[in-house]
Amino acid sequence: MKKSSIVFALVPLVFMALVFSGCGEIKTTSYFTPTKTKLKDYQAVQFENFETEIEDFPKEALAKIPAESAALLDTKDKFKEVSNSEITNIPASETVIILGEVAEFRPSSDVSFEGGGIKFGEVSITIKLALLDKATGNEIATGEINGFSSLGFMAKDIYESMAKEIVTYILEIY
């Protein structure tokens, strides 16, 4: 194999490494109000589809994040039933409802060269959450989850990351 063939093969690999070196970072943070209510007093958790008034927010995420949260929480075997649809076989007094609203969404399509790589912009979303007693409508806790992706678009991983953050909090107050 000639030297020029090796260089020809390596140049695209080096270019790809430089291009994607700044991409892929997903961060999720959360803050919730302290609560004295322990969720082990409840048998079921019902996730509702999230809402938003932000027109350019990806509509599939409004159902995807609560669905992924419900699926993940269900694997933890803490509640008799976890669902992202109406729970009717467990009394309302023993059911927690999770409501969410996308309060902020900053999409980005700009491309820049930073730190030796091309960045495809940054996307951030903020979701405000409320945990309610289904029977009374009383608030158990409120919180906020922030997700950030340097990929420049709403990657599947950011949905999963936000779902994990929601489940982590629920398990903390279980």
Image (tube, grey):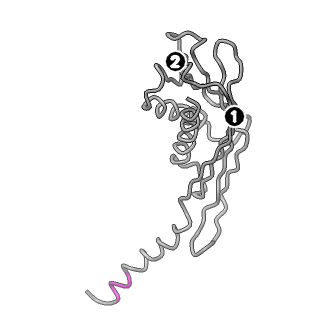
* Residue to which mark 1 is pinned: 34
Position in image of residue 67 (x %, y %):
52, 31
Figure disc tally: 2
* Residue to which mark 2 is pinned: 43
Which disc, if any, is residue 142? none
11 left or right of 105 in image: left
Magenta residues, as a range?
4-8
Residue type indicated by callout 2: Gln
Write the residue at 65% across / 18% down. Answer: 133
For the stretch drawn in magenta, the main secondary structure is: helix
> To which quarter of the image does residue 50 belong?
top right
Figure quadrant of the C terminus:
top right
Position in image of residue 74 (x %, y %):
45, 28
Residue type indicated by callout 1: Pro
Depth check: 29 or 11 in front? Answer: 29
Q: Residues within 10 Å of mark 2 (few under 14, many from 20)?
A: some
Write the residue at 53% across / 41% down. Answer: 164
Q: Disc 1 versus disc 2: distance between alpha carbons? A: 21 Å
Q: Is residue 72 magenta?
A: no
Position in image of residue 49 (x %, y %):
60, 28
Figure quadrant of the N terminus:
bottom left
